[in-house]
Image: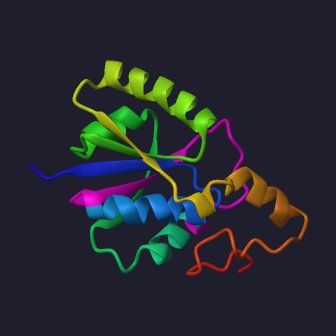
Amino acid sequence: MKKIAVFPGSFDPITRGHENIVRRGAVLFDEVIVAIGINSTKQSMFSLEKRKAWIEQTFQDLPNVRVETYEGLTVDFCENNNAHFLLRGLRNGGDFEYERTIAHMNKALMPSLETVLVFTDPEFASVHSTVIREIFKNKGDVSQFVPKQIDIHA
C-alpha cells in the first residue's frame, strides 16, 4: 500500500516552516498532498489561485508532492485521496496541545488516519503566517520568511 500523507492548511501565505515540514515529509512518505483548505468563514489575504501557484513553485523539484484544494472536513479529503497519514508541524508546546486535540477528533472520525507530528527545524520555530501577513500589510520585507521560489510582492 502506498503511504500517502496530507499536509492541510490555509497557507496564507506558505512559510519556510511549512516548506521545511513538507520537504522532510516527502522523504518519509511515498506521496505528500499539500491540501489548501477553503474556509468560507475566513477571509484570506492572498487568493486561492496565488497560494496554490506559490506552493506548486516551491515543490516543483519534488515529484512526490502535489497540491490540491478542498472544502469540508480534512478526514473526508484524506479518505477520498486514500491517505492514511496526516502530516503536521510543531513549533512549540502550544502547537502540540492544539494538534493533539485535532488528532484525537480526526481519529474518532477516521480510525485508519494516523497523525504524524514533525518538529520544525529550530530556525523556523518563530515563523507564523499571521505575523508574516502583518509584516506584509505594513510594507515590511517578508522574503526571509517565505520560500525563495516565490515573490510575495508579485
Q: Is residue 48 visible in this depiction of the protein?
A: no
Magenta span contains residue 36: yes
Residue 87 versus residue 62 in the image, above or below: above
Apparent side of residue 79 relative to residue 1 in the rendered image (left or right): right
- The answer to which of 11 and 43 lies nearer the viewer is 11
Q: Position of residue 127 (x, y in %)?
A: 67, 57
Judged from this view, the residue extending furthest toward the top is 108
Residue at 28% across, 74% down? 63
Residue at 27% across, 57% down? 28
* Quarter in which the C terminus is drawn: bottom right
Q: Position of residue 59 (x, y in %)?
A: 42, 73
Residue 56 versus residue 86 in the image, above or below: below
Residue at 56% across, 60% down? 17
Apparent side of residue 70 relative to residue 148 in the rendered image (left or right): left
| Magenta highlight range | 28-50
Apparent side of residue 62 relative to residue 21 in the rendered image (left or right): left
Residue at 21% across, 44% down? 82
Q: Position of residue 8 (x, y in %)?
A: 46, 47
Residue 8 versus residue 145 in the image, above or below: above
**Residue 95 sits in quarter:** top right
- The answer to which of 64 and 50 lies nearer the viewer is 64
Judged from this view, the residue extending furthest toward the left is 1
